[in-house]
Image (tube, grey):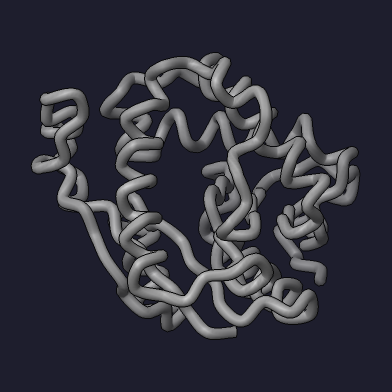
Amino acid sequence: MSIAQDTIQLTLKPLEPKHVATAAQCIASTFSKSEPMSEALAISEEEFIYFSQIVTQKAASDQLSVVVVTDEDEVVGALICEDYTSPPPAGLEQASEKFEPIAALLEVLGKRFNQEHEVTPGSHLHMSMCGIYPQYVRQRLAQRLIQFAEDMGRRKGYKATVCEATGSISQHMMENSLNYIYADEIVYKTFQYEGQAIFKNIDSVSSCKVYHKPI
């Protein structure tokens, strides 16, 4: 699928191994600057790059993720997807310890979702991270990436998608533009990690929300 962006031609396509480096950089750059939990924990772009490289390498192998690329095949947007039952990629334990509170919060939400829904290998496509460079955000690329991933997941036999929307923009998009169904949430200021309200300073949005959608 092609999209006209001024004089630049943008194309949506499945993430391939050749996209790993630029997709990982896109995710690291955007998440370190705009994702509420990453900002609260002061995770730098340099700390994020190792994490995103590990995740993106696995995504290329899984063949479930999608990217937006320029006519020179440079990634300007990426949506990292995985089977919801998939274990974390090897090597992730070497990432910065700053990621641990985020993982803990998402683990709680994941366990609760599994208790309320029938999740089996191949049933739910998990949309874990979506990053778009700022100069392209007005092109509805996030929505296009998600819809492209939904179509690809459907063709591969998935019955539903699930995601955690951590910010107000992504939550608004899931609810109002993409017709996702609210499932659960954790209020940032009340979440405890090792006895501390680790996300108490997040003011831009109240909670991390889980959404799902039959496909």
Residue at the image position 66 percent from the left and 49 percent from the top:
78
Rendered position, 193 above or below 126: above
Q: Which image quadrant is residue 177 in? A: bottom left
Residue at the image position 65 percent from the left and 35 percent from the top:
89
Q: Classify the position of the N terminus by image quarter.
A: bottom right
Indicate left or right for 98 with 143 as reference.
left
**Residue 44 or 122: which is nearer the viewer?**
122
Indicate left or right for 25 with 182 as reference.
right
Q: Which image quadrant is residue 94 in? A: top right
Indicate left or right for 2 with 39 as reference.
right
Residue at the image position 87 percent from the left and 40 percent from the top:
17
**Residue 164 rendering spot, x and y as whole percentages:** 40, 57
**Residue 151 rendering spot, x and y as whole percentages:** 71, 78
**Residue 101 or 146: which is nearer the viewer?**
101
The image shows a total of numbered marks equal to: 0
Q: Classify the position of the C terminus by image quarter.
A: bottom right
Q: Which image quadrant is residue 196 in? A: top left
**Residue 7 rendering spot, x and y as whole percentages:** 79, 55
**Residue 28 rendering spot, x and y as whole percentages:** 56, 30
Residue at the image position 82 percent from the left and 46 percent from the top:
61
